């Protein structure tokens, strides 16, 4: 019988466990050598370098981020990872390069116009209506209402049923129906994959729509996305607003505009129901209320002040598995290397240097978004694990793909690109560990105030985001945590105001039915502020998280069975009440197991979704409830040849191949582009002794989330074009950035070490 410890007792026992395991961790002999390489001094050095003034905030398409890329390439090479991308020369390399468009929307010249009886009646600009697209848009079309814009056959829900959206602009609500109902089929009070704007726009596109208008749900009990973003401050208040970036050859080919409540009310004026009543009726029965809007036509007029073409790169290295039978299968360990760059200091204020010290105000003052936690911590974590596995000698049975993505801050660009252009077959990708902000304690901040409960003590707590889609994955991590002693939490899977599920690089792979989780220590007041500096990182806690990831990756990589993926988590099950545990009767189970735990088979038993059990004001750690229906993903039994289809129970989404070069020989930055869509011709060819594993390339498919006759979801996976917010307002010039000289074996680290000392 599973016991639920009270929160104070749980935290005490976790701390005791942490001390025990710090002295004598239960690590199998064949994994111990790599485990011992995970030390605080190396993490401190790497985070300090990545978050230093020298890298100037690592903004995509800026020299500081290019420097970070070259440094990561050097670290992967030192770890003897195999390069599996292809350079322009045709030689294998570590950079998966792709083309993007960086643009600055012209808010003053961007508008939507309502026409009734063929004549303009209303014109709206930002902030009432705001949107952005990488090309100029002039579009006039009738408007239809499409509810929440969701097509979910496995939930027997389709907002487009009976609605002709072809050639129309669709008006849709944000989020999902019944999000305040704990028993909703849309995973209770949490978000499912259908709630994100990206998936909704692709779904509208699949149904023939030519544009999308999005409004926050009329009956919402949370801030709008724009209001939530405004709470953060920091980056969105900078003197030179952040540009928007989008993948040049994007699956999304239609524009989307976000409008406020008053605009939506005007658009619905010819309907027989108010927006609030439409939402109420949808949620009462989960019956779509989509309809045409008589005599309602919109003209969308979108303009940009500037547009530039450039290239950015994911950094990718492969550790090949030791078992010829399982080597074609892949475990991904990932993070992102970019952040928010550098800008002029606001008038009369100074900045913050890499040590967290205030700098002098003045004309030459620069504000650097250091991004120590977001996401130098995750990048350093991926590198540390690459070193650990490489140093271990014995390898897991499956292969491990180490990836540091580009362009996460601009809309998960690198992750969406790789999901659409995989270097290893997605059908054989068994799990993803994604690090994004793993170095701090979660603290109250304006973004989260009033929206989510934060435990009183988060000093030993790790959040797993996406646990509902693979309780088997969560079970393995929780099991391995017995050797580490963290408190595992899934609170972010049970809230709908912060949109956390969609906000990091695991999400594009989750859309492919891959068990993928974001490892995350939570938000804090320095998030997206210049004060996110290296001296604030808790390196002891970060070390424990990486130890847990190392042990978990071994399990994913070598257990006979792999984590099952749950296509439809459904309503979260309620754990049965159990007898209270007293301080006298409570014990720490299996604190020091008598024999090694590896590598026993993991059965395909689904645990349902982990629930948060609360005691007064403090949520407890991850608790695993009773079983539920799963989609089992069997391990391969034979190596896959070039003329065999890869066995999988994922939705069959084949890798997409393109033509051209993987990395252009020309400079990456800022060539002006004409206001037309630029088709990307990047070619990424796997260089791998398991190339035969990959199914033949097929043409790209642009699709929303649909299901096959068996109910398996086939979600859309196109790259996200970053939705504009207050930070995307155009009109200011780019910051003055001093070019960084790329030289030395470690691409800049030698110069840094002269000032700060090499790692111990």
Image (spheres, helix red, strand yellow):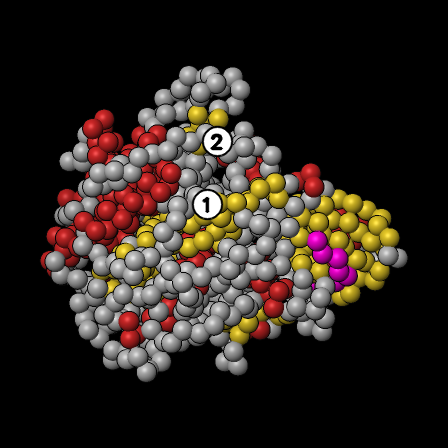
Is 143 contained in the magenta span? Answer: yes
Q: Where, quadrant-wise, is the N terminus in this rendering?
A: bottom left
Residues at marks 1 and 2 touching, judged by CB atoms closer than 8 Å? no
- The quarter holding residue 646 reads bottom left
Query: From which residue to which does the magenta span run?
Result: 138-147
Query: In this rendering, would 461 be left or right of 587?
Result: right
Residue sitting at 59 percent across and 45 percent down? 724
Task: Tell me if residue 584 comes above or below residue 430 in the rendering.
Answer: above
Mark 1 or mark 2: which is in front? 2
Q: Furthest-right residue in view?
A: 117
Give the camera-side residue of 328 and 11: 328
Give the camera-side residue of 72 and 177: 72
Q: Where, quadrant-wise, is the C terminus in this rendering?
A: top left
Residue sitting at 81 percent across and 46 percent down? 122
| Residue 735, disc | 2
Residue sitting at 60 percent across and 38 percent down? 729
Could you tell me if residue 134 is visible in this image? yes
| Residue 409, disc | 1
Tag 1's secondary structure? loop
């Amino acid at each position: 019988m599973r016991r639920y410890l009270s929160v104070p007792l749980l935290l005490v026992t976790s701390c005791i466990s942490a001390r025990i395991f710090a002295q004598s961790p239960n690590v199998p002999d064949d994994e111990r050598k790599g485990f011992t390489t995970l030390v605080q001094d190396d993490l401190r050095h790497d985070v300090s370098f990545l978050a230093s003034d020298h890298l100037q905030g690592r903004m995509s398409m800026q020299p500081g981020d290019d420097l970070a890329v070259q440094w990561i390439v050097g670290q992967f090479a030192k770890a003897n990872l195999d390069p599996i991308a292809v350079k322009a020369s045709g030689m294998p390399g570590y950079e998966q390069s792709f083309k993007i468009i960086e643009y600055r929307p012209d808010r003053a010249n961007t508008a939507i116009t309502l026409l009734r009886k063929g004549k303009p009646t209303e014109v709206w600009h930002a902030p009432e209506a705001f949107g952005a697209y990488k090309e100029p848009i002039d579009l006039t079309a009738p408007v239809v209402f499409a509810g929440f814009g969701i097509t979910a056959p496995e939930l027997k829900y389709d907002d487009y049923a009976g609605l002709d959206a072809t050639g129309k602009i669709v008006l849709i609500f944000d989020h999902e129906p019944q999000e305040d109902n704990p028993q909703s089929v849309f995973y209770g009070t949490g978000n499912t994959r259908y709630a994100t704007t990206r998936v909704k726009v692709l779904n509208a596109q699949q149904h023939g729509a030519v544009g999308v208008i999005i409004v926050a749900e009329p009956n919402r009990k949370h801030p709008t996305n724009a209001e939530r973003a405004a709470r953060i401050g920091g980056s969105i208040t900078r003197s030179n607003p952040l540009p928007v970036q989008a993948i040049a050859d994007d699956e999304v080919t239609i524009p989307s505009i976000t409008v406020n409540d008053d605009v939506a009310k005007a658009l619905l004026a010819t309907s027989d129901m108010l927006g609030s009543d439409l939402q109420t009726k949808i949620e009462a029965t989960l019956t779509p209320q989509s309809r045409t809007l008589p005599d309602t036509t919109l003209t969308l007029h979108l303009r940009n002040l500037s547009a530039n073409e450039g290239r950015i790169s994911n950094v990718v290295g492969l550790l090949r598995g030791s078992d010829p039978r399982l080597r074609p299968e892949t475990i991904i360990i990932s993070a992102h290397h970019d952040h928010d760059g550098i800008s002029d200091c606001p008038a009369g204020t100074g900045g913050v240097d890499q040590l967290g010290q205030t700098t002098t105000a003045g004309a030459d003052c620069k504000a650097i978004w250091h991004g120590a936690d977001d996401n130098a911590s995750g990048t350093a974590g991926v590198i540390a694990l690459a070193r650990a596995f490489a140093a271990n000698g014995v390898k897991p049975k499956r292969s491990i793909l180490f990836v540091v993505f580009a362009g996460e801050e601009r809309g998960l660009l690198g992750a969406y690109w790789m999901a659409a252009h995989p270097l290893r077959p997605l059908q054989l990708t068994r799990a993803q560990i994604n690090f994004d902000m793993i170095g701090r304690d979660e603290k109250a901040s304006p973004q989260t105030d009033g929206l989510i409960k934060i435990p009183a003590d988060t000093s030993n707590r790790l959040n797993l985001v996406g646990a509902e889609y693979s309780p088997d994955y969560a079970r393995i991590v929780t099991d391995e945590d017995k050797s580490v002693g963290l408190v595992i939490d899934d609170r972010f899977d049970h809230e709908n105001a912060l949109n956390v599920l969609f906000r990091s690089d695991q999400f594009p792979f989750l859309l492919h039915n891959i068990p993928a989780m974001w490892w995350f220590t939570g938000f804090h007041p320095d998030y997206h502020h210049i004060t996110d500096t290296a001296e604030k990182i808790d390196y002891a806690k970060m070390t424990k998280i990486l130890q847990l990831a190392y042990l978990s990756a071994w399990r994913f990589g070598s257990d006979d069975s792999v984590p099952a993926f749950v296509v439809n988590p459904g309503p979260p099950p309620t754990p049965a009440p159990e007898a209270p545990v007293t301080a006298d009767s409570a014990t720490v189970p299996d604190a020091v197991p008598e024999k090694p735990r590896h590598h026993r088979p993991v059965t395909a038993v689904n645990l349902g979704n982990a629930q948060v059990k609360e005691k007064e004001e403090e949520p407890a750690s991850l608790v695993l409830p009773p079983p539920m229906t799963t989609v089992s993903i069997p391990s391969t039994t034979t190596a896959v040849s070039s003329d065999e289809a890869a066995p999988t129970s994922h939705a069959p989404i084949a890798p997409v191949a393109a033509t051209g070069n993987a990395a252009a020989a020309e400079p990456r930055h800022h060539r002006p582009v004409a206001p037309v869509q630029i088709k990307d011709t990047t070619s990424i060819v796997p260089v791998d002794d398991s190339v035969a594993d990959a199914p033949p390339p097929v043409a790209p498919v642009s699709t929303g989330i649909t299901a096959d006759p068996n109910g398996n979801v086939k979600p859309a996976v196109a790259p996200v074009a970053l939705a504009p917010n207050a930070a995307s307002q155009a009109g200011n010039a780019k910051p003055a950035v001093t070019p960084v000289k790329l030289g030395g074996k470690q691409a800049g680290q030698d110069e840094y070490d002269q000032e700060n000392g090499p790692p111990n």
